[in-house]
Structure formats: C-alpha cells, structure tokens
C-alpha cells in the first residue's frame, strides 16, 4: 500500500499563523498537518476540519462527526469553543473568524514554502490555462495546483494549505463573484507571475459592467511583492491592452497578432479535434479542438520557457492534456458529429464555439442546440439576441434554443435572416433532445452549448437512443 505523504508543517504552525487559541497538548501540536476539509463527510484520519458558517448551514454542527471520522483538529469560532465537551475542546483551534484565519494560514504557508507561484484569472479559459501551465511545468518540477473548481475565497486558501511542502512551483486559479475578491485572493497567494486570460461578459451580472470586470481582473496584481513579478495578458484583447499600460509592473502579452510577445501562428484545427500552431519556430499540437485553446496554451509556453523546460517536453505535455468531457469534446453518434461544450457558456465562449463549429464542419451542414447564458444581469436579453444573430450569420442551418431566453435567441436568428422553420424554441434540455432528434440528420455537425445548469450534455447522451 502506498504511504500517505506527510507535510513538513504541523498543527502548531496553524495555531501560530492563525493567531489562534487552543488547549491542545504539545504532542498534538507537533502532529503533521493533514488535509483541510469544510465537509465532514470527506474527512479522513489525520485531517483537519474547518467549521464555516453560511446562510444555509453551520459547520460547527458537524465538528463531532469530523472527529468521529478521524480528524485530529477542527478550526472553529473561538466564541463557540465552550459549547463542546471537554475532550473535544482539547482538539480545537479557536479563531476570531475561521475563514479569515485560514487565509492568514495560507499566506504564511506560502511564504514558508518560498516557491514561485503562478496565478490565473480571466473571464474565460482559466481552468484550461491553469491545467496547461501545470502540465508543462510538471515535466521538470513538482507542482502544486488548484484541484477541481477550488478557485474562490474558500478554495484558494485550502489549495495552498494542501501543498505538501516538496513543491517547487505553485499554479493557482482565482475566480470571483464580486469586486475585491480577486485582490483578496492575490494577497493570499502572492503570485510571481499573474495571468489574465481575457475580459468578457461571463458573470457580468455580478460585477455590473465591463469596466468593473476589467478592474476586478486586474486586482490579481494586488499580491505582487517583488519587482520581478510579471503580468501576462492576452494581447489580442482590446480591453486588457487599454488597461495594462497603467500598472507599472512588467507586462508580457500573448496572442495571435504581431503586437504580442508570445505569438502563435499557422493555427490549424483538424476535423478529428486536434489543434496545432507555431511559436518561435516550434510546432505544438493540442488534443483539444479550437483556436481558443491556443490562447490557453500560450501562457504555459511562456512559463515553461521562463523556468527552463525544454521545448520538446513542453510539446509533449501540451499534446497529452485532453479536454474535459464537457469542455469542447468532439464525439460522433448516429452519424452526427457533436461538439459537447456544456460546462458553461457566456458570449465570448459562445463566439469561440461558433468558430470551432465552422472549423470542424469544413463546409458541411451545421446545427446548434444552445441554452441560456446565465449571470448576465441587465445584459441578458441583448446578449441572447446577439447570440442568435451570430449563429445565423455563421450559416447554421438548424437552431434549437432552450431555456428562459430561448425566444430572444430565436428572435436574433430570425432577425439575421434565418428561416423561421429552422428555429425551434424549447423550455429545457429534455425537450431540446426531442427537437434535435426531429431536425438533425446524418452528416450534420452540431454544437451543444449552454450554462452548466442547462445540462445540455443530456442531448448527446440521449441522441440516437
């Protein structure tokens, strides 16, 4: 049986870094730190439970369950310590604010590790960019990386605290649902290199407007502590270009136009779902379909070169990484080629997906089954109409629009000249499946894309059955 790795830090470090009060014995304080969990059902022997209170639940209710599962400590509100039995109190780390304390612990641990950290944010492509960077660097280094979608005010500090201590580089993804959050997270991770993938309408309803979105993403520089820190930005994004000159930090651009320092050229997308391109005379191949994935790979090529990873090893890492099953996978079923891109949707990612649809179809008949783009706020109606117009302008032969905004997508498509009989509006994914079965035919290439809540992947799963 493979032995579990142990961190070099102890529970005592957490107590000190979190400015905590505790009644733990010296022996317990010397215990190595296990994983931190805020879900008591995931706790394993040796782990630490984090009791967080939210509008819907209170983690302090599950402290006992965490200890039953083998937790060696729990981080709790110090005002709640005395509500527990005496044996439990001897295992508690009491702090004024558990979430704020974990942020301090993570920052202290990051400084304790004293390794380069790369932080990634942006409206689209954060996760894929982070995965590419980590894969390239892992060719030569032990890399600590964000797991899953742990990219928010809770997940980021827990990500840092999960580093084992033998990492040589960290790659952390930062997301936000309000202004100021990226700045807070950046101050926790203190990046040496910060990446902004792009600026778009994703979650714009949470920020208020594009200007506010730009301001929020640039908060990633708030954690810069060294003059050598680098901001890596998409040079083909006009909103990023307009803002980047104001910062005063070292800035490097990436993209496909001549003004970019890290520039991709000769981009090709094959019908089998791979993408290839050139950078500085070297040819790279991605096992992911679409030009938009090139933008995610370029920061990885920069990072690999920055840290001395040989070009051939970078190429191997990029080619080996496969798309998430819901992020642009190309699959064929019952004679129809599906682009299954159902993890999320916003206007920018929809535009990239429409370009991919044309690349994959190569002149054949195209169709689209699209769902709502959520969290667009006051822009929702206009942006859904624009989506319909773009699909029609791209020559999509058949359109199935699903969700609350389906009629706006349909209006936009018809307004751009699509025949009314080629447009279907349905309330949800199950009805979209029925419509798809009626209108699709062998040889079609169809785009499936909508926000996660729409679950449009069920159209692919049920098609042909």
Image (cartoon, grey):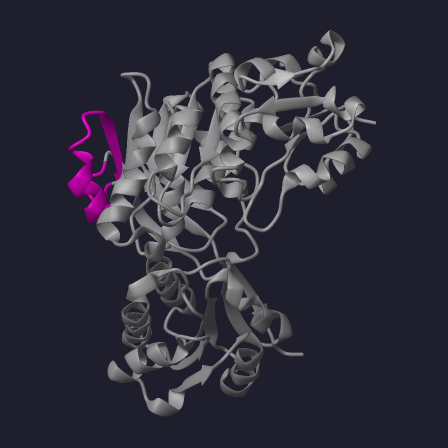
Name the residue: 77% across, 35% down: 64
The part of the image, by quadrant, that contains residue 248 is top left
Name the residue: 53% across, 21% down: 105
Residue 454 in the image: x percent, y percent? 51, 68
Q: Is residue 444 above or below residue 102?
A: below
Asked whether the viewer can see residue 163, the reply is: no
Name the residue: 40% across, 49% down: 293
In the figure, is residue 162 to the left or right of 312?
Answer: right
Q: How many marks?
A: 0
Between 385 and 216, the one lying in front of the other is 216
Asked whether the viewer can see residue 91, the reply is: yes
Name the residue: 46% across, 66% down: 449
Q: Residue furthest bottom?
A: 421
Q: Is residue 251 above or below residue 369?
A: above
Tell me where the magenta segment starts and ends, as one range. 235-260
Based on the picture, tell me whether residue 331 belongs to the magenta stretch. no
Q: Is residue 47 above or below residue 22?
A: below
């Amino acid at each position: 049986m493979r032995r579990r790795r142990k961190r070099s830090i102890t529970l005592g470090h957490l107590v000190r870094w979190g400015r905590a009060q505790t009644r733990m014995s010296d022996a317990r304080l010397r215990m190595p730190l296990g994983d931190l969990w805020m879900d008591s059902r995931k706790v394993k022997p040796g782990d630490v439970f984090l009791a967080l209170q939210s509008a819907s639940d209170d983690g302090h209710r599950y402290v006992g369950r965490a200890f039953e599962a083998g937790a060696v400590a729990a981080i709790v509100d110090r005002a709640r310590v005395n509500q527990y039995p005496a044996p439990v109190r001897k295992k508690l780390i009491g702090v004024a604010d558990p979430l704020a304390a974990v942020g301090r612990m993570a920052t202290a641990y990051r400084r304790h590790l004293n390794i380069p950290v790369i932080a990634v944010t942006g409206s689209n492509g954060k996760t894929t960019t982070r995965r590419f960077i980590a894969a390239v660097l892992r060719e030569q280094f032990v890399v600590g990386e964000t797991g899953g979608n742990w990219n928010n005010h809770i997940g980021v500090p827990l990500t840092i605290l999960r580093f084992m201590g033998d990492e040589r580089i960290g790659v952390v993804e930062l997301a936000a649902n309000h202004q100021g959050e990226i700045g807070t997270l950046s101050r926790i991770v203190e990046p040496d290199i910060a990446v902004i993938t792009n600026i778009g309408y994703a979650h714009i309803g949470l920020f208020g407007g594009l200007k506010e979105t730009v301001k929020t993403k640039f908060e990633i520089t708030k954690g810069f502590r060294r003059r050598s820190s680098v901001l890596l930005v998409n040079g083909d994004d006009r909103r990023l270009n307009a803002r980047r000159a104001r910062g005063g930090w070292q800035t490097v651009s990436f993209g496909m136009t001549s003004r970019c320092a890290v520039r991709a050229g000769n981009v090709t997308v094959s019908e089998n779902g791979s993408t290839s391109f050139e950078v500085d005379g070297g040819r790279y191949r991605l096992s992911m379909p679409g030009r938009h994935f090139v933008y995610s790979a370029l920061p990885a090529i920069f990072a690999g070169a920055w840290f001395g990873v040989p070009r051939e090893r970078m190429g191997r890492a990029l080619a080996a990484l496969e798309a998430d099953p819901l992020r642009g996978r190309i699959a064929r079923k019952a004679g129809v080629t599906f682009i299954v891109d159902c993890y999320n949707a916003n206007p920018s990612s929809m535009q990239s997906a429409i370009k991919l649809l044309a690349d994959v179809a190569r002149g054949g008949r195209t169709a689209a089954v699209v769902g709502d783009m959520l969290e667009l706020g006051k822009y929702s109606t206009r942006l859904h109409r624009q989506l319909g117009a773009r699909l029609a302008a791209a020559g999509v032969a058949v359109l199935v629009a699903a969700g609350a905004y389906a009629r706006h997508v349909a209006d936009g498509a018809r307004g751009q000249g699509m025949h009314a009989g080629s447009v279907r509006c349905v309330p949800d994914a199950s009805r979209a499946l029925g419509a798809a079965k009626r209108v699709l035919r062998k040889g079609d290439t169809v785009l499936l894309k909508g926000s996660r809540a729409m679950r449009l992947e069920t159209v692919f799963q049920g098609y042909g059955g």
